[in-house]
Image (spheres, rainbow, N blue to C red):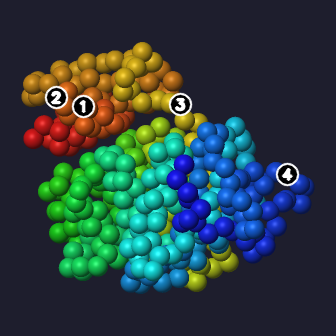
Amino acid sequence: MKNLETYLQPLDLSQFETIITENHFPTWGEKLIINKQGEPFPTLDKTVEIAIVGVEEDRASLRNVGCGKAANEIRKYFYPLMPQDTRFKIADLGNLKLGQSVRDSYFALAEVVSTLLQNNILPIVIGGSNDMVIGTYMAYVNISQIINILNVDSHLDLISEQEEVSDENYIHKLLCNEPNYLFDYTHIAYQSYFVDKKALEMLDNLRLEYCRLGQVQSELEKVEPMIRDADMVILDVNAIRASDAPCSTSPHGLYGEEFCKIVNYAGMSDKLTSICFTGINPDRDINGRTSHIVAHALYYFIDGYMWRKRDFPQKDKSNYYKFTVLVEENSDELVFYKSKKSGRWWVEVPCSQESKYKYFNHYIVPCNYEDYQSAMEGEVPARWLIAYNKMNL
């Protein structure tokens, strides 16, 4: 394994509150393999499945300077939580060492994340400004993996006039990056009054999905297939309403419980390989409430991960029911799969063998039972159409 120690700053545990409960029940602070100050860098063997990486970089933030302090604040609330299951190991690798420039920090984060991915360790990136997502994305470029990204944010950071990357244009940079390893981008929980119509038109032109806040809140279970389709999930704390997360910029947004449910769905997805929590600013928080919610979200992500079913119909389809639907207006049969383990649904997109090889993780698209019902009534699922157009047009 590449020398991660070069890029990571060990933690001084004396700055955190007591991580042992009064009743001396085990806590995550005790169970984690921590990169501690004054001790050798921890060994990451095959029993380690998740690694936390803190980011203190906020130099490219235009309006949220201070979010670089978030990682350690979140740890203060996460460490005292009590794990319900410890069948696998989780490491906390400390905080990323800042580079001389923001671009150096992107490079360092990409090196850390790509190394973890290559060793089948799922990185949880906490803290920093939104643009640090660039570093996580670059990790996939490093290993030549085409991915889907899902972003949970009240805003759509697509400002294109700025030449330098910032937390207000990083999505535009992701979509326009060369070489491009982004197959699909999905944006959920945006708030219409924060998003220019031209930005949504751009997503339409690129055949990308988006879902506004009201739709997410009224039909939370229906966005689960979107989450399950992501390799990388980004969660901006501004997606949460300010009453629940005081450093959020909007009085409207997801409730804390809804935010944690989305994170729990992400944890349960066998396809997901990284997750990023961004935009948390302790300087704007009240009594640590925002950091506390994110700490709970980490708990729910790990809980979801423990419920993974190794459930994705790529090669072996013996554990799935197969349903074939012929839609009159479409020359292709729609082939649906329902898992015998979890009851979850997928639909297969017909494409060439070359496309199947290139888009190995993407030609079988997560969906739900309602999509199957719609197909039975002659309506082709929108998610199927989007994937079909990308692979065949």
Quarter of the image holding residue 252?
A: bottom left
Three-letter amino acid code at the position of disc 3: Lys
* Along the line of sight, the residue nearer the viewer: 106 or 294: 106
Residue 74 can be seen in this image: no
| Residue 37 visible in the current orientation | yes
Give the mark, 1 or 3, whose residue is nearer the N terminus: 3
Question: Distance between the Cα atoms at labels 4 and 2?
Answer: 55 Å
* Dot 1 amino acid type: Lys
Residue 356, label in figure: 1
At x 46% / y 66%, what residue is drawn?
A: 108
- Circle nearer the N terminus (3, 2): 3
Circle 2 Cα neighbour tier, 10 Å, few/some/many (<14 / 14–19 / ≥20)? few
The span from disc 4 to disc 3 (Cα, nearest Å) is 29 Å
* Residue indicated by mark 3: 309
Q: Secondary structure at mark 3?
A: loop
**Which secondary structure, mark 4?**
loop
Q: Position of residue 207 (x, y in %)?
A: 18, 51
- Crowding at label 4, few (<14), some or many (≥20) Cα neighbours within 10 Å? few
Q: Nearer the viewer, mark 4 or mark 2?
A: 2
Q: CB of mark 1 within 8 Å of CB of mark 2?
A: yes
Left-right relation of 225 to 87: left
